[in-house]
Amino acid sequence: MGRYVIRRLLQMIPVFIGATLLIFLMVHVMGDPIAGLCGERQCDPATEDRLRREFGLDRPVWQQYTTYMGHVFSGDFGTAFNGQKVIDLMASAFPVTIRLTLVAVAFELVIGVVLGVITGLRRGRPVDTSVLLLTLVVIAVPTFVTGLLAQLVFGVKWRIVQPSVSYTAPLDELILPGLVLASVSLAYVTRLTRTSVAENVRSDYVRTAIAKGLPRHRVITRHLLRNSLIPVVTFIGTDIGALMGGAIVTERIFNIHGVGFQLYQGILRQNTQTVVGFVTVLVIVFLLANLLVDLVYAVLDPRIRYA
């Protein structure tokens, strides 16, 4: 197992470099950041030259990328055009988005898996049809519509939760935004779990466990569920990074100053340092989440061994 982890970590290095290089090039194609910094008015030529030298934009793109990666490996993600360190923006944004993502993943695991198991064991019955229709509606409705409706109903009409949360967003204020963020993924987790449970419930090892007289709850939790969760774990592992990077709409609706808010501001102002820095960290999150998924496979299925 140890050698496998080391090999996977070494494989992440070229993937990380390739992904960050692609992101760096795409962000630089977005437009001239100096023009975005000056706004609608045209910059004075002397001021423009000074800003380009200050932020290193007067050098070739490959040299800018090499310098940037050198700073990244030393823990410096550069300085935003407003003079604030990108690492300071990360220190305030990532804790909020991590808490929001954890709430969303908890909803996916609890509600999605439970509904998937119930519908998988009762395939073709009214409860199965109802849940399938409900998940189809959730998938079809855009997130911004779900968020606005949830904010209107639960925050304004019923006053169960606050219609908008604070910048720091404590955990109790993230329940509704977390549910909105997880809504589409929750529907997919429910359908994945249902399909996997419905397939595995007819397997020989489940029939053998039932024939041995094992209690029903033990057959479901120890035998059926562990094998059925493998595709679900794969989806959730890749979904963690997607939730963190795709929270722009949810964070805008609920006034949360997290990663999505900072990415939106960076793109709007063509702040390349902010965008590249945040996306670089999200790439690391994706890579580590995929490694964690592979390790969880061995826990769920003892037959899986990594050399």
Image (spheres, rainbow, N blue to C red):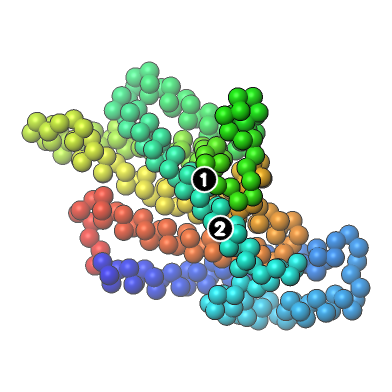
87 vs 7, nearest the viewer:
87
- Disc 2 versus disc 1: distance between alpha carbons? 14 Å
Q: Is residue 261 above or below residue 229?
A: below
| Residue bearing mark 2 | 94
Report the amino acid beneath label 1: Leu
Q: Residues within 10 Å of mark 1 (few under 14, many from 20)?
A: few
Q: Quadrant of the C terminus?
A: bottom left
| Residue bearing mark 1 | 171
Q: Are marks 2 and 1 in contact (CB under 8 Å)?
A: no
Q: Give the mark count.
A: 2
User: Along the horizontal axis of the image, is 98 left or right of 164?
Assistant: left
**SS state under label 1:** helix
Q: Is residue 5 above or below residue 116?
A: below
Image coordinates of residue 255 in percent, x first then y, are 66, 45
Q: Residue at x 43, y 26 (%)?
A: 131
* Residue 62 visible (yes or no): no
Q: Quadrant of residue 263?
A: bottom right
- Camera-near label (2 vs 1) is 1
Image coordinates of residue 34 in percent, x first then y, are 80, 69
